[in-house]
Image (cartoon, helix red, strand yellow):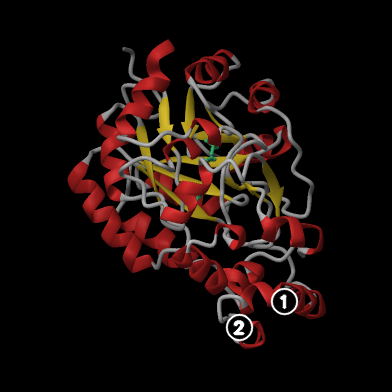
């Protein structure tokens, strides 16, 4: 099979970065060996933990990517709006013994997810591919990482973002459709991220830029992969389909919920982190979605301990159950089987 030019892999398939636990070195190895390009999820990790993971990844494979969160440029949220949301979700926190007044008082004044240290690390110890989500990275960082030898990809969700990422000097785009699981990579977290197909977004982006495109969002089988390639994508990324595999680090509570008939649908919500993300519709989402402020990462920090305890206690009704619309097709078993099944129509 032809090697895809942008990624240097045998298959035009990508194991998408999934921060917060699901991405592991074992998932990277399994999907890489099956012929996909796998990403490490640099978001939420300390720079030191990411450096350690990269060192191990270099020992396991010669081609992989690292994904980083671009820090928010949204002005700090209104403290009163944040306090009102804390008050609203306080009973859910109390159910797990978390005092949200104390959490609110101790919120970090600023959090850029260790941006400078992580970019510096990737400049000093280059990896084959670097991708960004949540916004445009500074052009100087894109240039520096390219000069260090990395292929640089920028996640976009609209043709306008695609045009701007092209101007920034990116080598390629990750085009994420609104059906993707987890956080939307939208550059404008205040906007309403709709419900359309990834194929439509890819077609619109391909008409606007010459850059190669990796399509992501809502993929549930091999025909969906083939359709995105026909729409002009050079490769297709999957996240949700890997969440229940043996090698993923997904919590038991999340894994089980993905196949639980009590959670048949997904929705885009700010309820868990303050940034739009697609999750299984559960009690927490239903109660609080309409009231959640546009306030990432503040809401992420506000709910983090509550969510950690909910996961540990098997309380799926209060956990952020990130999932794309293809979640019903997420199978258990080896991740390599998922990659092979997706490649069946290529
Ligand atoms: C649990 C989870 C965590 C995610 N974390 C990240 C991340 O750290 N960085 C990122 O760019 N995208 C992240 N995403 C989005 C994926 O990279 C990808 O765009 C998405 O999973 C594709 O849609 P699908 O889930 O329908 O396959 C995450 C998705 C999920 C489900």
Residue 262: assigned label: none
Label 1 vs label 2: CA separation? 9 Å
Q: Which residue occupies 41% across, 27% down?
A: 13
Residue 243 found in image quarter: top left
Dot 1: what SS? helix
Q: Is residue 316 above or below residue 246?
A: below
Give the crowd class for mark 1: few <14, some 14-19, many >=20 residues within 10 Å: many
Q: Which residue occupies 48% across, 61% down?
A: 314
Residue 133 is situated, as x and y percent measured from the top left of the image, at 56, 49
Residue 180 is situated, as x and y percent measured from the top left of the image, at 60, 38
Residue 303: tell me if it is visible.
yes
Q: In the orientation shown, which residue stands out farthest toward the left?
A: 59
Contact (Cβ within 8 Å) of mark 1 with mark 2: yes
The residue beneath circle 1 is 86
Q: Is residue 206 above or below residue 336?
A: above
Q: Earlier in the sequence, mark 1 or mark 2?
A: 1
Residue 108 found in image quarter: bottom right
Residue 8: tell me if it is visible.
no
Is the CB of the residue bearing disc 1 within 8 angstroms of ligand 1? no
Q: Is residue 5 above or below residue 140?
A: above
Dot 2: what SS? helix
Residue 142 is situated, as x and y percent measured from the top left of the image, at 50, 48
Residue 157 is situated, as x and y percent measured from the top left of the image, at 66, 38
In the figure, is residue 344 to the left or right of 83?
left
Q: Is residue 258 above or below residue 254?
A: above
In the figure, is residue 83 to the left or right of 26?
right
Q: Nearer the viewer, residue 165 or 43?
A: 43
The residue beneath circle 2 is 103
In the figure, is residue 213 to the left or right of 104?
left
């Amino acid at each position: 099979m032809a090697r895809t030019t942008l990624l240097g892999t045998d298959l035009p398939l990508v194991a998408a970065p999934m921060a917060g636990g699901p991405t592991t070195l074992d998932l990277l190895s399994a999907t890489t060996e099956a012929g996909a390009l796998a990403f490490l999820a640099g978001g939420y990790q300390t720079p030191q933990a990411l450096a350690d993971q990269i060192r191990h990844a270099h020992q396991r494979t010669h081609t992989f990517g690292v994904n980083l969160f671009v820090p928010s440029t949204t002005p700090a949220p209104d403290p009163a709006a944040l306090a009102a949301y804390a008050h609203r979700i306080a009973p859910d926190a109390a159910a797990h013994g978390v005092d949200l007044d104390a959490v609110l008082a101790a919120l970090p004044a600023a959090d850029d997810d260790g941006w400078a240290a992580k970019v510096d690390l990737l400049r000093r110890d280059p990896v084959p591919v670097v991708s960004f989500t949540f916004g445009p990275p500074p052009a100087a960082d894109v240039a520096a990482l390219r000069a260090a030898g990395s292929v640089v990809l920028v996640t976009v969700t609209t043709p306008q973002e695609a045009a701007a990422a092209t101007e920034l000097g990116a080598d390629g785009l990750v085009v994420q459709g609104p059906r993707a699981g987890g956080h939307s990579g939208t550059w404008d977290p205040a906007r309403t991220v709709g419900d359309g197909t990834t194929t439509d977004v890819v077609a619109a982006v391909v008409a606007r830029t010459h850059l190669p495109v990796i399509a992501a969002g809502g993929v549930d089988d091999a025909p969906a992969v083939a359709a995105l390639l026909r729409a002009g994508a050079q490769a297709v990324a999957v996240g949700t389909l890997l969440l229940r595999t043996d090698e993923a680090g997904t919590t038991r509570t999340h894994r089980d919920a993905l196949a639980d008939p009590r959670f048949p649908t997904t929705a885009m919500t700010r309820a868990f982190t303050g940034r739009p993300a697609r999750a299984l519709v559960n009690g927490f989402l239903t109660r609080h979605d309409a009231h959640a402020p546009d306030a990432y990462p503040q809401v992420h920090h506000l709910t983090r301990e509550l969510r950690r305890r909910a996961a540990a206690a098997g309380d799926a009704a209060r956990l952020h159950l990130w999932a794309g619309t293809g979640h019903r097709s997420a199978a258990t078993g080896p991740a390599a089987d998922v990659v092979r099944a997706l490649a069946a129509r290529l």
